[in-house]
Amino acid sequence: MVSARSISTVLRLASLACALAVVACSGAGNEDLFAGAAEANDTSTNEPSAAPSPSAGAKTGGTTPTPGSSPSPPPPDTGTVPPPAPTTATCTPEIEPNNDPAKATPFKTAFCGKIDSVADVDYASFVVPMGAKTIDVKHSEKNGKAVYRYFLGGASLGSDPGALEPIPGATYTVQIHLDKSGSATALPTYELDVAFQ
């Protein structure tokens, strides 16, 4: 017979796993994710506890104090805006510097970043998995527009993702920069999603 305590433990673990998946690319640190863990681990009752929301215990910075210690100060504000919150749990955030193809941030299916200046150019790369028959590329921006160019082996394939052939093992590089036909003061955040069939 399964006890209420066992069910409560399973629910807490499942809730924690969901919270981790939701905020995987949101920039939240482990201390932010586990801030409510002490409350969730209270085993003084045999009643199952309600699952915490992904934002339960979230803070703006610092670490979760342990009993008998004081919290550390929040990290200094660097003045930069983080990449957009991902729409997929597997989004890979850009790693600066990534302003040339040799420093492209590798990703599997989703890539998030931010155009930091009018001259900023970001590069990302992905490898076509074995057995892929099609490549479907989608992108979205917030607070401005970006231009995407695709490369294979250093050769430009242009801005049309439909030109990408599903060559198993091929590494495609994507260049992302500000769409200068729009407002130069609107520096967008973006997400690039690649699906293989």
Image: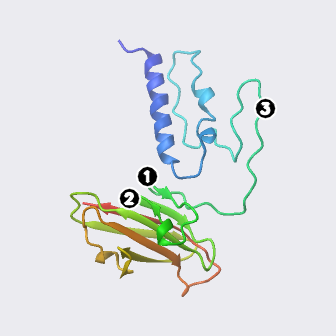
In the image: residue 15, left or right of residue 81: left
Residue 60: x and y, percent? 69, 48
Quadrant for the C terminus in the image: bottom left
Q: Amino acid at mark 3?
A: Ser
Task: Name which residue lies at 52% across and 77% down.
Answer: 177
In the image: residue 145, left or right of residue 131: right
Question: Do tag 3 and tag 2 residues touch (Cβ < 8 Å)?
Answer: no
Out of 87 and 49, give the one closest to the viewer: 87
Secondary structure under tag 2 reads loop
Quadrant for the N terminus in the image: top left
Q: Which mark is residue 109?
A: 2
Task: Name which residue lies at 44% across and 18% down.
Answer: 6
Residue 79: x and y, percent? 72, 63
Residue 116 visible (yes or no): yes
Residue 86: x and y, percent? 49, 57
Gap in Å between the C-alphas at discs 3 and 1?
34 Å
In the image: residue 92, left or right of residue 69: left
Residue 56 visible (yes or no): no
Count of numbered labels shown in the rendering:
3
Question: Do tag 2 and tag 1 residues touch (Cβ < 8 Å)?
Answer: yes
Q: Amino acid at mark 1?
A: Thr
Pointer 1 residue? 90
Out of 176 and 13, give the one closest to the viewer: 176
Gap in Å between the C-alphas at discs 2 and 1?
7 Å
Secondary structure under tag 1 reads loop
Upstream in sequence: badge 3 or badge 2? 3
Question: Do tag 3 and tag 1 residues touch (Cβ < 8 Å)?
Answer: no
Secondary structure under tag 3 reads loop
Upstream in sequence: badge 2 or badge 1? 1
Upstream in sequence: badge 3 or badge 1? 3
Q: Which mark is residue 70?
A: 3
